[in-house]
Image (cartoon, rainbow, N blue to C red):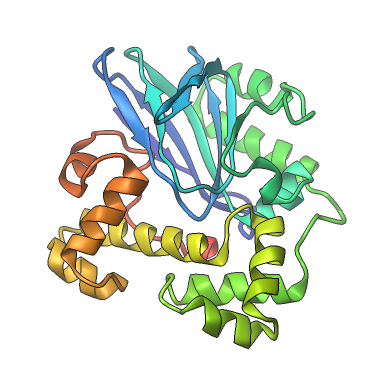
Amino acid sequence: MTQQVHRVHPALQTYVARCVGYDYLPDPRAVHHGLPSPTATLVIAFDDPLDTEWLGDPRSRARRWTTVSGLGVRPALIHTHGIQRGIQLDLTPAGVGALLGMPVAAIADSLHTLADLGLGDELHERLASAVSWPDRFALLDGLLLAQLHTDPVGPPPEVTHAWDLISRSRGRLRVSVVADRAGWSRRHLQTRFGAEYGVSPKQAARLFRFHYARSLALRGRPLAAIAYQAGYADQAHLTRDWHELAGAPPVATLREMFPIVQDEVVDARAR
């Protein structure tokens, strides 16, 4: 199993929260749970297309060389077929606007290819032909820098401020408090926030809280302590919410030996 964490070019760091190259040979029967998070995901697969579907929705299953998904509160299933090799980019909402030219709400709770979004297959074709990880990452940086929009799509300042409040509190602020600090009514905030991010303020808070809880669990913290530190009512609340978001309880989720999703920390750039 190989994992290559790449620090993207400084001009991209506002937009790419995390970039990882992976080369993994799992059991061909293994099915991995892709977990919801407060970042959008772009996966470029090599050797074999990524076979993905939403949990509970077999009609969504397809094999894709590039897979783009926005924010959402349900897990994906990844059928590994014995080989997983490619690059995963975790894009901030600002990164979706700057690199894909659309609000993150446009890809909310959905699975697309870059071609579906009218962006072509050049990224996959050129990266797949590279012969080493350093070559791939250098090529990737160049392609992403060329893709940057000079006038990126972005939400109104009040909505961005609401997102920042939720992220800095790791989902612990009440929506009414967020709305008050953003200067809008709760109802107006929910409407505008959902239109920009594809999730409600409450769902965004849930994603940040879960993401933080998972990072604590990967550091070996006991669940009761995680529940308290991450802002859950109790351990039962944590376990219930985790199961709904991950499709499995905490112990089963952490047992999965797939390096890309098991991030060690909540990246500050995603917040």
Give the residue at x 34% y 34%: 33
Q: Would you place residue 93 above or below residue 43 in this image?
A: below
- Who is closer to the viewer here, 141 or 218? 218
Give the residue at x 45% y 79%: 173
Q: Quadrant of residue 139?
A: top right
At which x and y percent is residue 117?
74, 31
At which x and y percent is residue 182?
66, 82
State which quarter of the image contains the N terminus.
Answer: top left
In the image as oriented, which residue stretches furthest toward the front? 187
How many marks overall? 0
- Who is closer to the viewer here, 4 or 191? 191
Give the residue at x 37% y 42%: 261
At which x and y percent is residue 267?
45, 60
Q: Quadrant of residue 194?
A: bottom right
Q: Would you place residue 246 above or below residue 229 in this image?
A: above
Q: Would you place residue 170 above or below residue 59 in this image?
A: below
Q: Is residue 131 left or right of residue 258?
A: right
